[in-house]
């Protein structure tokens, strides 16, 4: 709906508004989604400390709360039509975070009437009409308007304003009952995007009213902007006394659920050093420009399937498992608790997001261990070999393994190293390969397919022997080449 250039979501350009505030700052006690209902200069006088954002669209409520951390959100104007309007689930999600959400005048009045039983608070006459069922149609508050650079100027009449104006003309005796009825019925029959003085006059004349021009002019000259009155009432309330929170509320069966999570993952804005972007646009850009997107998505889907499978099995990680998983995560990502906040900011995450990520990682971790144990002696051999084949890495990996096996089979140690030699041998292997286990060693052995510590040490010993033998052969070849180069032809 686009009442006020807003709820109808239909604007003269159809462009979606940005979440950036006028002064470029962040942090506010109250944010207000506002368009044509009240001009910005007046709104700032009524609510000096408010942060004013463009008419709201789908996904922007959650984005704004994450960016500005307000105590109160007020929805006045919103978009619909070319852009999707704010979802009820967004409002429930924000209410569930303890933020008070108010609505008035246009899209805000509609949503407040629909979500009032869950805690959204409505202000103004238009809200009361929707709440009490006197009005039900979205087009009652819809209109066309100009863009922000021209002050969200209203280009058409919203039906609610026509109704209040006719009511005033009746009370003042400037209209009789029949005239009032015909004006309202004729205006209602018009498409909201064409409700103007001239189109109303033409429609009245077409319906048999020879005085159509005069009647439409009467509405214009006595026009009551009820949407503005309601919005002003809301802003004054926000600046003075918010009153008590509603107490008798119904708990939604699903306050946020999958839809809210989907919106947060897709339709919310994030602020990057190069500008603002919606989350779904990031992934669309990756799909268009990153050559390994298919492989990336395949890994992502396999991980998601694993999480879902773990949940189906009821694998709920314990506090100890979560702590261990967090430690593994930090090691794997090369982070510390001190550097973690910067990483979260750079990845458009907060601590709550990280907790969800760690929970999912812990679930898949337990699922992988369960699967490996189920395979018995085979463990990870077949699945890793098949994955190498699918990634076209198997021939090279197999050739290198065979080469090292041949080198390690040359005369040398064929038993486990002495205990005193183990630390040095492990340090040598780490230096040569960069191998750094991200979890306690016994778990690392188990999850990497080694049947025992002895098997691991024998493999490391063979690798060390192969490196030494390879280095020895290289040295011999280089010396031989040197001798050849020294031979001078006669």
Image: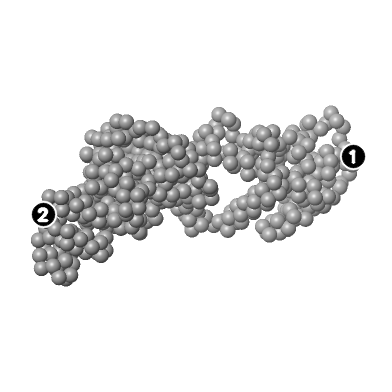
Task: Say which residue appears at 32% left-offset and 31% top-offset.
Answer: 241
- SS for dot 2: loop
Which residue is labeled 1 in the image? Answer: 415
Task: Say which residue appears at 17% left-offset and 59% top-offset.
Answer: 177
Q: CA distance from mark 1 to mark 2?
A: 109 Å
Return the x and y of residue 457 as percentages of the image width and height. 82, 39
Q: Is residue 192 above or below residue 113?
A: below
Looking at the picture, tell me which residue is in the foreground, 374 or 156.
156
Which residue is labeled 2 in the image? Answer: 174
Total number of numbered discs in the rendering: 2
Return the x and y of residue 71 as percentages of the image width and height. 40, 34
Return the x and y of residue 431 as percentages of the image width and height. 70, 36
Classify residue 361 as left or right of residue 124.
right
- SS for dot 1: loop
Residue 383 visible here: yes
Residue 22 occupies which quadrant of the picture? Answer: top left
Task: Say which residue appears at 15% left-offset and 50% top-offset.
Answer: 171
Answer few, some or many: residues within 10 Å of disc 2's Cα (few below 14, many 20 plus, some between 14 and 19): few
Classify residue 325 as left or right of residue 137.
right
């Amino acid at each position: 709906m686009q009442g006020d250039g807003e709820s109808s979501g239909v604007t003269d350009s159809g462009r979606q508004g940005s979440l950036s505030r006028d002064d470029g700052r962040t942090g506010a006690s109250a944010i207000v989604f506002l368009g044509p209902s009240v001009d910005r200069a007046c709104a700032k006088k009524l609510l000096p400390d408010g942060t004013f954002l463009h008419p709201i669209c789908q996904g922007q409520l959650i984005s704004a709360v994450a960016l500005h951390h307000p105590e109160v959100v007020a929805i006045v104007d919103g978009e619909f039509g070319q852009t999707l309007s704010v979802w009820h689930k967004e409002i429930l999600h924000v209410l569930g975070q303890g933020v008070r959400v108010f609505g008035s005048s246009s899209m805000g009045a509609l949503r407040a009437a629909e979500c009032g039983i869950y805690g959204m608070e409505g202000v103004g006459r238009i809200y009361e009409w929707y709440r009490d069922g006197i009005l039900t149609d979205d087009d009652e508050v819809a209109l066309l308007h100009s863009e922000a650079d021209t002050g969200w100027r209203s280009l058409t009449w919203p039906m609610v304003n026509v109704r209040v104006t006719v009511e005033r003309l009746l009370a003042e005796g400037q209209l009789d009952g029949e005239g009032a009825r015909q004006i309202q019925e004729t205006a209602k029959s018009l498409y909201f995007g064409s409700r103007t003085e001239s189109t109303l006059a033409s429609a009245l004349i077409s319906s048999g009213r020879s005085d159509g021009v005069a009647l439409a002019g009467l509405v214009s000259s006595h026009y009551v902007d009820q949407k503005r009155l309601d919005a002003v009432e809301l802003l004054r309330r926000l600046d003075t006394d918010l009153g008590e929170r509603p107490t008798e509320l119904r708990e939604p069966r699903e306050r946020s659920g999958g839809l809210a999570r989907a919106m947060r993952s897709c339709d919310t804005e994030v602020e990057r050093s190069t500008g603002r972007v919606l989350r779904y646009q990031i992934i669309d850009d990756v799909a268009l420009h990153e050559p390994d997107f298919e492989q990336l998505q395949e890994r992502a889907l396999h991980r998601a399937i694993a999480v879902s499978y773990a949940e189906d099995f009821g694998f709920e990680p314990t506090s100890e498992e979560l702590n261990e998983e967090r430690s593994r995560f930090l090691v794997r990502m090369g982070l510390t608790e001190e550097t973690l906040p910067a990483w979260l900011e750079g990845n458009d995450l907060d601590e709550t997001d990280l907790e969800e990520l760690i929970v999912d990682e812990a679930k898949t971790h337990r699922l992988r261990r369960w699967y490996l144990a189920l395979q018995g002696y085979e463990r990870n051999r077949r699945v890793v070999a098949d994955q190498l084949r699918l990634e076209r890495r198997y021939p090279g990996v197999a050739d290198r393994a065979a080469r090292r096996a041949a080198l390690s089979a040359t005369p040398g140690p064929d038993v486990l190293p002495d205990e005193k030699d183990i630390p040095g041998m492990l340090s040598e292997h780490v230096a040569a390969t960069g191998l750094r286990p991200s979890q306690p060693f016994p778990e690392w052995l188990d999850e990497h397919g080694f049947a025992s510590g002895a098997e691991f040490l024998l493999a490391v010993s063979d690798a060390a022997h192969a490196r030494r033998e390879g280095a020895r052969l290289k040295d011999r070849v280089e010396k031989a080449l040197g001798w050849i180069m020294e031979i001078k032809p006669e």
